[in-house]
């Protein structure tokens, strides 16, 4: 028992030091008053009232509300594209031969061997008006496209950056599936698409949820990709937070934005997972009730 408590104490201490305490510090700054000092806020001392002006500002000002909604939209679409693209990739790697799996996984993780900023700058060279993509398009007789500093460029950067975070957990889950279940389904006459929908997809849902969380959470607070690829119109919440923190030096407002983003990222996935579990449980209850109501087939007469 003592050994188990010691093992559990290590991750709890890590969470306390590097997650809970910084979150409490950010919340304390969000409840403080702006001030012309270093740091630029008035700490909450005994006898001073707590200020909720920063939270009132981000809830009432359309700038922050629109930035939050745009960030959630970009994160949701980027996650959906990563899921639709990454699931076939993970399934193909999981069902490939043993000698090719390592090579295919290496190709998935290969972009991580280069610096993040270098990769995004490379996309600037590809997407700009006289970049490689437009050069090839013009050579093929196609019209040049305006790609850089558009929403399309932001989604391209998001999907390119976070696609491995979707593929890897899906691959890990898909390699754990029992192949005999698919063989049994084929022996019983189930076509491949039905076996996928009834066996592979439900059993891979833990990997799907892990990939969704790994992609959507950092994508919602992304700063570098909208800044370098999106142009001035891509006012995501990460850029707004940066401007409030460094340009305006309004630490309480920046901290309130960070707190609001964390709350949304905690509540939305939790609500989605809870609703999905309730739907799966209701469907299981419905199938069980239907199976009990189905009349039993009488054995053939001898």
Image (tube, rainbow, N blue to C red):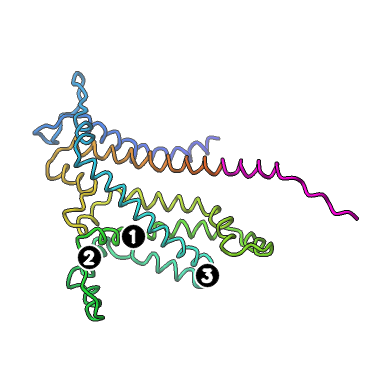
User: In this view of the protein, which residue sits in the foreground, 11 or 29?
Assistant: 29
Q: Which image quadrant for residue 20?
A: top left
Residue ID at (20%, 26%): 51
Q: Which mark is residue 159?
A: 1
Percent across and percent down for residue 240 are 19, 45
Label 3, on which residue?
96
* Numbered range of the magenta stretch: 282-302
Residue ID at (24%, 39%): 257
Classify mark 2: residues with Cα within 10 Å, few (<14), some (14-19) or many (20+). many
Residue ID at (25%, 36%): 26
Mark 2 and mark 1 lie on one chain; the one further toward the N terminus is 2
User: Relative to residue 155, is residue 122 depicted above or below?
Assistant: below
Q: Secondary structure at mark 3?
A: loop
Mark 3 and mark 2 lie on one chain; the one further toward the N terminus is 3
Percent across and percent down for residue 131 are 20, 72
Q: Secondary structure at mark 2?
A: loop
Real-space CA distance between mark 3 and mark 2, rounded to the nearest whole angstrom: 35 Å
Classify mark 3: residues with Cα within 10 Å, few (<14), some (14-19) or many (20+). few
Residues under numbered marks 3 and 1 in contact, where contact means CB atoms less than 8 Å apart: no
Real-space CA distance between mark 3 and mark 1, rounded to the nearest whole angstrom: 24 Å
User: Relative to residue 299, is residue 268 depicted above or below?
Assistant: above
Mark 3 and mark 1 lie on one chain; the one further toward the N terminus is 3
Residues under numbered marks 3 and 2 in contact, where contact means CB atoms less than 8 Å apart: no
Q: Pick the quarter of the image with the N terminus.
A: top right
Q: Pick the quarter of the image with the C terminus.
A: bottom right
Residue 5 falls inside the magenta stretch: no
Real-space CA distance between mark 2 and mark 1, rounded to the nearest whole angstrom: 15 Å
Left or right for 274, reference 63: right
Classify mark 1: residues with Cα within 10 Å, few (<14), some (14-19) or many (20+). many
Label 2, on which residue?
147
Residue 295 falls inside the magenta stretch: yes
User: In this view of the protein, which residue sits in the foreground, 150 or 4?
Assistant: 150
């Amino acid at each position: 028992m003592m050994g188990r408590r010691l093992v559990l104490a290590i991750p709890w201490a890590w969470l306390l030091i590097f997650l809970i305490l910084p979150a409490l510090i950010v919340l304390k700054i969000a409840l403080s008053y702006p001030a012309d000092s270093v740091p630029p806020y008035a700490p909450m001392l005994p006898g001073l009232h707590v200020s909720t002006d920063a939270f009132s500002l981000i809830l009432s000002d359309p700038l922050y509300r629109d930035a939050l909604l745009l960030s959630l939209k970009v994160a949701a679409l980027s996650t959906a594209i990563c899921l639709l693209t990454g699931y076939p990739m993970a399934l193909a790697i999981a069902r490939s031969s043993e000698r090719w799996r390592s090579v295919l996984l290496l190709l998935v993780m290969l972009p991580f061997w280069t610096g993040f900023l270098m990769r995004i700058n490379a996309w600037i060279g590809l997407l700009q008006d006289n970049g490689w993509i437009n050069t090839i398009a013009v050579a093929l007789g196609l019209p040049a496209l305006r790609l850089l500093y558009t929403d399309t460029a932001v989604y391209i950067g998001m999907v390119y950056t976070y696609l491995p975070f979707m593929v890897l957990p899906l691959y890990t889950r898909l390699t754990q599936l029992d192949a005999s279940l698919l063989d049994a389904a084929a022996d019983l006459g189930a076509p491949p698409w039905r076996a996928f929908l009834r066996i592979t997809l439900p059993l891979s849902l833990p990997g799907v949820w892990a990939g969704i969380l790994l992609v959507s959470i950092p994508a919602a607070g992304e700063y570098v990709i909208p800044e370098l690829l999106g142009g001035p119109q891509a006012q995501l919440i990460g850029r707004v937070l940066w401007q409030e923190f460094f340009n305006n030096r309004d630490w309480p407002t920046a901290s309130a934005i960070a707190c609001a983003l964390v709350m949304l990222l905690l509540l939305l996935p939790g609500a989605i997972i809870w609703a999905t579990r309730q739907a799966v449980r209701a469907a299981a209850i419905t199938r069980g009730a239907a199976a009990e109501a189905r009349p039993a087939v009488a054995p053939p007469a001898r």
